[in-house]
Amino acid sequence: MAEHYRGVYAISVAAELVSMQVQNLRVYERRGLLEPARTAGGSRLYSRADIDRLHRIRDLLGEGLNLAGIARVLELEAEVDRLRAENEDLRGGRQAGSWGRGPVDRRTAALDEELVDPAERAGAEEAPVGGERGGVGRLHAGGSARGGA
């Protein structure tokens, strides 16, 4: 996958691969639509990912978008990709049939553990609710409160 992002194409080759003029590639870079790698001497080197992005820019231009619109579309597409990856990460354990092993489930379990009443952790049947004096009722191990003191 790293090869996909390694700059290997000179600007003239990249322009030919996407059927664009060299000047357009320079404009797209100035507008922040892509960032090709640079050699030590400052020459641009385009990666396979850059070529794919240039194809997407060309398609969006063909649909009538201006460069500002294209920048916004590319931004939103990147955000959607990021959110999809995050969603997959969060669902990871569940899809494999191991519910309760994803990062959210582990964090939820940790928070649930923090919320357990200390008396319940110790195995006590009842713990006072509402302060040291016994409060308004008693909290039972099942989590329900009963009236009386």
Image (cartoon, rainbow, N blue to C red):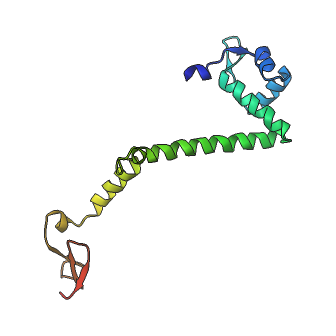
Q: Residue furthest bottom?
A: 148
Vertical position of residue 137 compared to residue 85: above or below: below
Query: In the drawing, does residue 74 fall left or right of residue 101?
Result: right
Viewer-nearest residue: 28 or 135: 28
Q: How many marks?
A: 0
Asked whether the viewer can see residue 17, the reply is yes
Q: Is residue 69 left or right of residue 91?
A: right
Residue 48 percent coordinates (x, y): 66, 22
Q: Residue at x 83, y 42 (%)?
A: 65
Residue drawn at x 71%, y 24% is 51
Q: Quadrant of residue 69?
A: top right
Q: Position of residue 54 (x, y in %)?
A: 75, 28
**Residue 36 falls in image quadrant:** top right
Above or below, comparing residue 84 to residue 147 in the picture: above
Q: Quadrant of the N terminus?
A: top right
Q: Position of residue 86 (x, y in %)?
A: 51, 44
Q: Is residue 35 left or right of residue 138?
A: right
Residue sticking out furthest to the front: 97
Q: Residue at x 66, y 26 (%)?
A: 49
| Residue 112, placed above or below residue 142 | above
Residue 74 location, x and y as percent?
A: 71, 39
Quadrant where the image shows the C terminus:
bottom left
7 or 56: nearer the eye? 56
Identity of the residue drawn at 83% across and 36% down: 61
Q: Is residue 35 visible?
A: no
Q: Is residue 138 above or below residue 62?
A: below
